[in-house]
Image (cartoon, grey):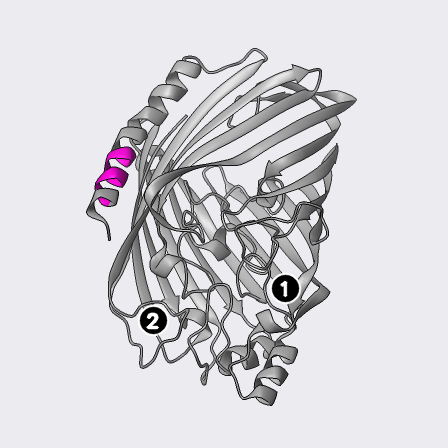
Amino acid sequence: MNTSFNRAAFSVKWLCLPLACVLAMVAHADDAVAPENWSLHAQATWVDQYHGDFRSPYAGANSLTARAQAKETFDLTIFAGARLWQGGEIYINPEIDQGFGFDNTLGVAGFTSGEAYKVGRSSPYGRLHRAFLRQTFNLGSGEETVAADVNQLAGTHARNRIVLTIGKFAVTDLFDNNSYAHDPRGDFLNWSMIDAGAFDYAADAWGYTLGVAGEWKQGDWTTRVGVFDLSKVPNSTQLETDFRQREVVAELERRYTFAGKSGTLRLLGFSNHGRMGSYADAIALGQATQTIPSTALVRRMASRAGAAINIEQQLGEEWGAFVRVSRNDGSKEAFEFTEINRSIAAGLSLKGAAWGRAQDTLGVAGVVNGLSAPARAYFAAGGIGILIGDGRLPHYGDEAIAEVYYNAAINAHLSVGLDYQYVDHPAYNRDRGPVNVIALRLRAAM
C-alpha cells in the first residue's frame, strides 16, 4: 500500500477529529431552545478492527482472510440545515471517508462494521451523502417540542402531522429505526444488529439512495411509505435515475406503554423490483455449461419482497431491550444489502448510572442469520454474492454472532468505545471459523 496515502489518511484523521468538535461548538455554543432557522453540526468517527487467525481449510473469492488482519475506517460529516419557509427545511451532509472493512467488506453476511462501506479507499475522499428537502404539514392536536439535533432544527411541531422527505438520503434514516441498535457510530457495529438483516434496502455502495417518503404521525401511531431508486446493477456504486428499478417500502409504528415503561413496535414490508438473478436459473445455466453459477448471467426484471418486525422496550430508567425478526424472498439474489434471507437479533442496552458513569453505555446482543435452500445450493455450487462466497459450502450452518460494546463518554463531545464480536460459521460455513473480532472506536461530535 502506498505509504504517502497512509500518512495522508493519518494526518486527515487526527486533524479532523478535533475539527468536528470545533465546528460544532462554534455553531452551537449554547443548546438551542428557541426555534432555529439554521443549524450546523459535525461528527468524526474512527474505527480500528482486528481479527486473529482462524481455522480455514479452504477459501474462495469472497472469503474472509484466515490470517490475522487489522483494518480502519474514518469519516468526517458536516450536517448543515436551514429553514426555507413555514414547515420547509433543507439539509446537506458532505462527508470525507477513508479506509476499509476486512477484505474490502467481504466474508461475513452479518458484516462486522457498519462504518465500513462496500467501497474502500486508502486516501481520504469526499462525497455528498445526503441532500434532501423536508416539508411538514401540521394537523393539530397540541404541540411537541423538537430538540436541536443533526438534520433536525429546534422548534415545535403539531403532535399530529404529515412529513414529506425528498432527495438523497438513507432509507434507514426513516425506516427500521431503533433507539438501542441503529447507529454504528455510537452503539452496535454489526450490520445485522443495527438493521434488520433481511431488509434489502435500496442503496448505493455507500448506503444512500434517491427517493421520496411520506410519514403520517397521528397520536401514538406513525405510518411511513417510500419509493426509492435501486442501483443500476446489484451492489453498484451508481443508482438508477428514473425509478425503473425501484424499492417500495412501508412501515407501521405503534408507540405504547407496558408496565409503566415506554415501548415501540414497528412492522415493515418492502418489495424490490429490478433486474435480478434467480438462484435456480444460475445453477441450471452452470450445470448446462459446466461452469460456476453466476446470478449476473441470468438477470431479468423480477420482484423480491420481505418483511421485518422491530421492537424496542424500556425495562428500567437506565436500560432497555430490542428484538428484530426479518425474512425475505430467498429464491433470488440479494440486490443491495447482504446475503441474509432470515434473521433474528436481540439485545440489551444499559446506561452507566449504576456504576457512576451516567453517560456511558454498555450493549450486549446476539443475532442468528440464515440462508434459504436455493441460496444454499447456489453457494454450495461455488457461486459468489455481494459479501460472501467461499467457493464451496459442503457443511452449511446458520451464521451466529454475539456482540458486546462499551462506549465511554470523555466529555459532552468526545467518546471512546471498545467492541468485541464472536462470529460462528462466517458466511454460513461450518468448515471455517469461529472468528474473534475486537474494535476500538473514537468519536467527536456535537
Tell me the residue at 38%/51% (across/down): 120
Residue 50: x %, y % from top left: 27, 56
Q: In what quadrant of the picture does the C terminus appear?
A: top left
326 to 399, vertically: above or below: above
Q: Specify the amino acid type for callout 2.
A: Pro
Q: Specify the amino acid type for callout 1.
A: Arg
Q: Which mark is residue 119?
A: none
Is 8 a magenta residue?
A: yes
Report the Cα–Cα distance between label 1 and label 2: 25 Å
Tell me the residue at 34%/20% (across/down): 22
For mark 1, give the secondary structure: strand
Is 280 a magenta residue?
A: no
Q: Residues within 10 Å of mark 2 (few under 14, many from 20)?
A: some
Q: What kind of secondary structure does the magenta stretch mostly adopt?
A: helix
Residue 439: x %, y % from top left: 30, 51
Left or right of 190 in this view: 132: right
427 to 373, vertically: above or below: above
Looking at this view, is 6 or 82 the one in front? 6
Range covered by the magenta-colored residues: 6-13
Residue 161: x %, y % from top left: 75, 28
Q: Quadrant of residue 36?
A: top right
Left or right of 258 in this view: 237: left
Tell me the residue at 60%/68% (across/down): 333
The answer to whether residue 430 shows anywhere in this view is yes
Left or right of 376 in this view: 210: right
Of the numbered discs 1 and 2, the one sitting upstream in the chain is: 1
Look at mark 2 in the image and give the residue it sits on: 434
Look at mark 1 in the image and give the residue it sits on: 327
Tell me the residue at 31%/68% (across/down): 65
Looking at this view, is 175 or 60 the one in front? 60
